[in-house]
Amino acid sequence: MLKLLKEQGSDIPDIAVLEGATRLRTEGAVSRPTRSALGNLADAGAVPILRWGIAPAILLAQKLGLDGWNARLETIEGSLSPVSVWAVWRT
């Protein structure tokens, strides 16, 4: 999935989230480039575009100490639309 998205030139937050979650699960740590990408996403206040990306993004934010991003994502998670595959939430 990651390879396909990258080959198609996709540049969405979900890629770094999926890479980070996969590495964390398989290797117990997030690579330096992915850690940097996640930090940039956190600084920008970016949100995964797919609904399933919110939960692993929260886990990564907690593990990496990205507290502001974690708080934002947890707020969003609490109001996600239950009928959309997209990360659609109420503000």
Image (cartoon, rainbow, N blue to C red):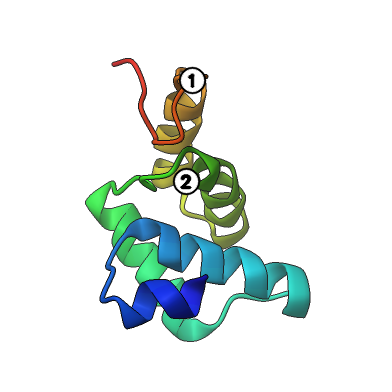
Q: Could you tell me the amino acid type at mark 1?
A: Val
What distance separates the C-alpha of mark 2 from that of mark 1?
28 Å
Q: Could you tell me the amino acid type at mark 2?
A: Asp
Q: Residue at x 43, y 44 (%)?
A: 50
Where 71 falls versus 48 (above or below)? above
Q: Residue at x 36, y 58 (%)?
A: 13
Badge 1: residue crowd in 10 Å (few <14, some 14–19, many ≥20) = few
- Closest to the observer, 84 or 51: 84
Instruction: Point out residue 71 in the picture as x, y percentages from the top left corner.
Output: 46, 35
Of pointers 2 and 1, the one earlier in the residue sequence? 2
User: For residue 29, which quarter of the picture?
Assistant: bottom right
Where 43 falls versus 10 (above or below)? above
Where 90 falls versus 63 (above or below)? above
Q: Residue at x 59, y 75 (%)?
A: 30
The number of callouts visible is 2
Badge 2: residue crowd in 10 Å (few <14, some 14–19, many ≥20) = some
Residue located beneath label 2 in the image:
67
Q: Nearer the viewer, mark 2 or mark 1?
A: 1
Helix, strand or loop status at disc 2: helix
User: Could you tell me if the residues under marks 2 and 1 are in contact, i.e. CB atoms within 8 Å?
Assistant: no
Task: Answer with left or right where residue 23 lies relative to residue 19.
Answer: right
Q: Give the label on residue 83, or none.
A: 1
Q: Residue at x 35, y 54 (%)?
A: 42
Where 66 falls versus 54 (above or below)? below
Instruction: Point out residue 6 in the picture as x, y percentages from the top left corner.
Output: 36, 78
Task: Answer with left or right where residue 5 lies relative to residue 63.
Answer: left
